[in-house]
Each structure stands twice: as structure tokens, then as C-alpha cells.
Amino acid sequence: MGLTRFLARRVATFVPTVVGVLLITYIIAYSIPGDPVRAWVGEKLLNPE
């Protein structure tokens, strides 16, 4: 019973932690000015040829 309680506690703290990290990452990525993808890739455009 001790192992089950331990695992339940670990899962109960793991899920909110992952959701919180994802939420903070999403907020930071979309609060910066401009397009996040363009900022990561760069401003170099492809040649139309």
C-alpha cells in the first residue's frame, strides 16, 4: 500500500508540473513581438527560382 500511495502522490504532482511548464512556455512564446517561428528560423527568405 505504501508504494501505491507514493506513486499516486508522484503522479499527482507530475501532471500539474508538466501542464504548468507547457502553459508558461506557450505564454512566453506568444507574448514576444513578431512571429515566433520566424524568430527561431531567421529572416532569410527562399529564392523564388
Image (spheres, grey):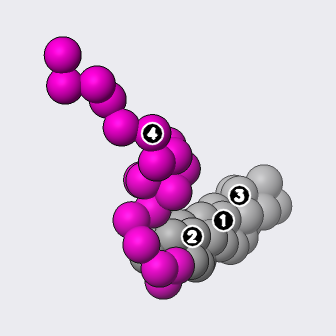
- Tell me where the magenta segment starts and ends, as one range: 31-49
Is residue 23 visible to us here? no
Q: Residue at x 36, y 37 (%)?
A: 45
Residue 48 colored in magenta in the image = yes
The quarter of the rendered structure image containing the N terminus is bottom right
Q: Earlier in the sequence, mark 4 or mark 3?
A: 3
- Between disc 4 and disc 1, the foreground one is 4
Residue 4 locus on image (x, y percent)? 69, 57
The number of callouts visible is: 4
Cα distance between the residues tagged 4 and 3? 49 Å
Q: Quadrant of the C terminus?
A: top left
Spatial CA span between label 3 and label 2? 27 Å
Tell which circle, 3 or 1, labels the residue nearer the N-terminal end. 3
Q: Which mark is residue 7?
A: 3
Q: Are marks 4 and 1 in contact (CB under 8 Å)?
A: no
Looking at the image, is mark 4 or mark 2 nearer the viewer? 4
Residue 25 got which mark? 2
Q: Which residue appears at 47% of the width and 79% of the height? A: 33
Q: Secondary structure at mark 3?
A: helix
Q: Looking at the image, tell me whether mark 2 or mark 1 is earlier in sequence order.
A: 1
- Which one is in front, 15 or 37? 37
Q: Earlier in the sequence, mark 4 or mark 2?
A: 2
How far apart marks 3 and 1 lie (CA) works out to: 10 Å
Amino acid type of the residue that numbered disc 1 sits on in the rendered structure: Phe
Q: Is residue 20 visible?
A: yes
Q: What kind of residue is marked 3?
A: Leu
Query: Could you tell me residue 25's position as x and y percent?
Result: 57, 70
Dot 1 lies on which element?
A: helix
Residue 13 in the figure: left or right of residue 23: right
* Label number found at residue 29: none
